[in-house]
């Protein structure tokens, strides 16, 4: 399976996070059995803390909701899985919805094609160290995090970009692209975020016992993630164009 290369240019609009997430999820109602994949690209117009389906019951203990409110950062839930992430203008967001018959029944394996589809154009842009994470590597990373008994590790392990997942994209050992999905009987929605800046800012909005821990958390997220701005002067629009021929609208 491949990301569609369309004759008509795609847009890269700036959207409010809650509206953009709902727009991604709406693709599930629009895709047709046997029809082509549907794709969206966007940049967040304002910041938001987002948690995946499996983290909803832990939202209050993971996200510092009061701190977010004071900073004007929305707190949102999404139907896709994944840990906590900071969604802002420093992330290039994409979604692709495909008929379920096109997708492997093995949920983990079903991400492989998308990882490969993203790695190829990134390498073509000059990111030679970009690669897809293998399953054993991801499981070893999660296992190593779980052996640690410190507050930083407990928080990092609950974030989207803090630990590796199979078939996501890294540059060297640092995560660049996070993946998640939603499945229905007829379709699968894959959502992904390409970091333009590392996720160290996420530490500002997570629950920590003290500011010393927040500082350590910030450093660890900086060490474990990388943004394209640290690797290239190309814009988010240029990266999207390289991947699927997107035409910039904003920024």
Image (spheres, helix red, strand yellow):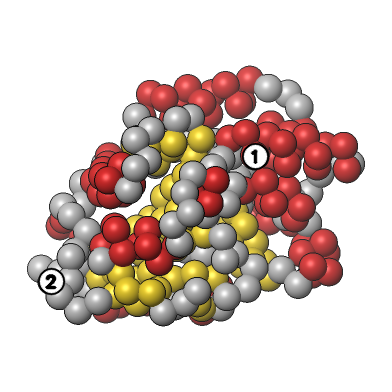
Measured as percent of width and height from the top left, residue 89 is found at: 57, 66
Report helix, strand or loop for mark 1.
helix
- Percent across and percent down for residue 70 are 83, 69
Crowding at dot 1, Cα within 10 Å, few <14 / some 14-19 / many 20+, comes out as many
Q: Is residue 246 left or right of residue 137?
A: left
Q: Nearer the viewer, residue 18 or 34?
A: 18
Q: Distance from label 2 to label 1 (Cα)? A: 40 Å
Q: Would residue 201 be visible to someone looking at this image?
A: yes
Residue behind mark 1: 221
Q: Please, what secondary structure does the residue beneath circle 2 have?
A: loop
Find residue 96 and report its image quarter: bottom left
Which label sits in the foreground, 2 or 1? Answer: 1
Which image quadrant is residue 156 in?
Answer: top right
Q: Is residue 2 left or right of residue 177?
A: left
Work out whether 38 lies above or below 168.
below
The residue lying at 44 percent from left, 36 percent from top is: 171
**13 is higher (above) or lower (below) than 149:** below
Closest to the observer, 64 or 2: 2
Q: Kindly identify which residue carries mark 2.
A: 35
Q: Is residue 248 left or right of residue 147?
A: left
């Amino acid at each position: 399976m491949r990301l569609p290369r369309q004759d008509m240019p795609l847009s890269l609009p700036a959207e409010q996070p809650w509206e953009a997430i709902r727009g991604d999820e709406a693709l599930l109602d629009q895709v047709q059995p046997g029809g082509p994949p549907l794709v969206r690209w966007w940049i967040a117009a304002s910041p938001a803390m987002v948690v995946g389906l499996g983290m909803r019951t832990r939202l209050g203990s993971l996200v510092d909701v009061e701190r977010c409110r004071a900073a004007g950062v929305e707190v949102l839930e999404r139907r896709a899985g994944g840990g906590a992430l900071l969604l802002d203008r420093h992330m290039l967001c994409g979604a692709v919805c495909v008929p379920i018959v096109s997708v492997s029944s093995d949920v983990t394996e079903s991400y492989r094609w998308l990882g490969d589809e993203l790695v190829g154009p990134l390498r073509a842009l000059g990111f030679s160290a970009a690669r897809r994470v293998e399953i054993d590597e991801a499981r070893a990373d999660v296992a190593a995090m779980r052996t640690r008994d410190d507050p930083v590790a407990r928080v990092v392990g609950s974030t989207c970009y803090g630990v590796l997942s199979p078939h996501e994209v890294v540059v060297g050992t640092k995560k660049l692209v996070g993946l998640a999905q939603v499945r229905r009987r007829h379709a699968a929605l894959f959502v992904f975020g390409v970091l333009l800046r590392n996720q160290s800012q996420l530490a500002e909005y997570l629950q920590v016992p003290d500011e010393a821990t927040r500082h350590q958390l910030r450093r660890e997220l900086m060490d474990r993630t990388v943004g394209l701005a640290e690797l290239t002067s190309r814009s988010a629009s240029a990266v999207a164009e390289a991947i699927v021929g997107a035409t910039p609208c904003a920024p």
